[in-house]
Image: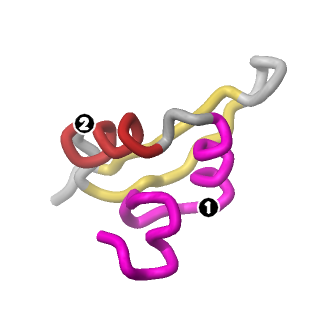
């Protein structure tokens, strides 16, 4: 049995929220640390949410292969 993790962000204007499932095992050491390491810049956050629902969060571009 895994721990489901959800990621969310407040959209411009502050009254709406966008969220999505980011996979099982949603511990800080597995999901939170990756978000901090790879998705701090606003353009990277846009990119991440543009991917849709995620089974695992990886480095930007990893959905194309060649990255863990």
Out of 40 and 32, give the one closest to the viewer.
40
Residue that carries the numbered disc 2 in the rendered image: 28
Residue shown at the point (51%, 67%) measured from the top left? 61
Residue shown at the point (38%, 35%) measured from the top left? 36
Residue shown at the point (38%, 80%) measured from the top left? 66
Residue shown at the point (49%, 41%) measured from the top left? 39
| Vertical placement of residue 1 versus 66, above or below | above
| Vertical placement of residue 48 versus 28, above or below | below
| Number of marks in picture | 2
Cα separation between marks 2 and 1: 20 Å
Q: Residue furthest bottom?
A: 65
How many other residues sit within 10 Å of disc 1, few (<14), some (14-19) or many (≥20)? Answer: few
Out of 51 and 26, give the one closest to the viewer.
51
Magenta stretch in the rendered image: 42-68
Is 35 one of the magenta-colored residues? no
How many other residues sit within 10 Å of disc 2, few (<14), some (14-19) or many (≥20)? Answer: few
Q: Residue furthest left?
A: 1
Secondary structure beneath dot 1 equals loop
**Label pair 2/1, CB-CB below 8 angstroms:** no
Residue that carries the numbered disc 1 in the rendered image: 52
């Amino acid at each position: 049995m895994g721990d489901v993790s959800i990621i969310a962000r407040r959209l411009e204007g502050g009254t709406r929220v966008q969220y999505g499932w980011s996979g099982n095992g949603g511990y800080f050491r597995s999901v939170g640390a990756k978000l901090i390491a790879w998705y701090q810049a606003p353009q990277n956050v846009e990119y991440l949410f543009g991917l849709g629902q995620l089974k695992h969060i990886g480095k930007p571009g990893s959905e194309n292969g060649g990255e863990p």
